Amino acid sequence: MHPALIVFIVIIGIPIVWLFLVLTVVKLIRRIYPFPIPPFATNLIDHPIRRKYWQNPEEIATNMGAKPGDIIVEIGPGKGSYTFAVANQILPDGKVYAIDIQIQVLNRLEKRLHKEGINNVIPKLDDVYNLSFEDESVDVIFAITCLPEIPEPVKALKEFKRIIKPNGIISLCELFIDPDYPLRRTEKKWAKEAGFELSEEFGNWFSYQLNFKKKKKN
Ligand SMILES: C[S@@+](CC[C@H](N)C(=O)[O-])C[C@H]1O[C@@H](n2cnc3c(N)ncnc32)[C@H](O)[C@@H]1O
């Protein structure tokens, strides 16, 4: 075998095979015992390569069309890079409610907000199946690599439908290397079941963003 091929297999091939094995094992365990990503791992996935090349926070914020003054709900903020990009886009008077199921994630986000002097983000522990927001009170709801981590995504989407304004946007982003990665058609099917229709889509099979609006009543 050519030495360059051996080096290629060792440096690129073996880590890729390992990554797929680990992702498959995590996915199988999650199917049986659903659990959210451990809080420390939200730092690991907030990688500069991801932010620069695969899921750029500013680009995602622009694609969802958030504008100054909007009321935004983010589900599953993790380390908060996407939260901050959206919060910046809706200044001076818009607000992002960052909803998570894990208090440790929210406490860390709170510290980061304080450190970076951001004051239009409100971290909030809430239940995605029964959100503490009024009917039709939110302009945009977004979730980055989070919806498939929720055990009943259609039930959560139905709750989003209750709180989103009639012309509001639900924006969902997924990344192939996430163990919970759903195909685009799966996520579109969930959204359709919950009463949404696709309004825009971005990206490719590796990283995509789907925007939905409430289905108009005939
Ligand atoms: C894979 S991380 C993604 C974090 C961040 N959006 C990103 O892309 O870097 C998923 C996030 O969703 C949160 N999460 C998981 N299940 C949830 C639920 N049922 N309700 C609210 N947040 C949830 C996790 O705690 C975590 O912050």
Image (tube, grey):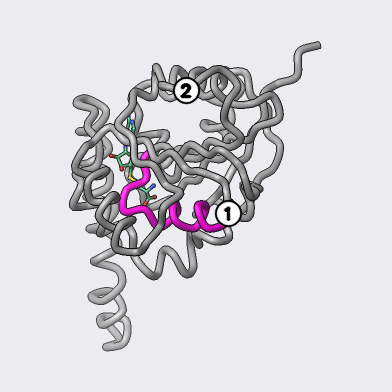
4 relative to 204, above or below: below
User: Helix, strand or loop at disc 1?
Assistant: loop
The image quadrant where one finds the C terminus is: top right
Q: Identify the residue at the far bottom of this view.
A: 3
Residue type at the position of mark 1: Pro
Q: Which mark is residue 133?
A: 2
Q: Is residue 201 left or right of residue 104?
A: right
Disc 2 to disc 1, C-alpha distance? 22 Å
Looking at the picture, tell me which residue is in the foreground, 165 or 2. Answer: 165
Magenta segment: 76-91
Q: Which mark is residue 92?
A: 1
Q: Residue at x 32, y 81 (%)?
A: 5
Looking at the picture, tell me which residue is in the foreground, 57 or 121. Answer: 121
Percent of width and height locating residue 97: 43, 38
Q: Earlier in the sequence, mark 2 or mark 1?
A: 1
Looking at the picture, tell me which residue is in the foreground, 58 or 16. Answer: 58
Specify whether residue 87 is painted magenta: yes
Q: Residue at x 22, y 58 (%)?
A: 18
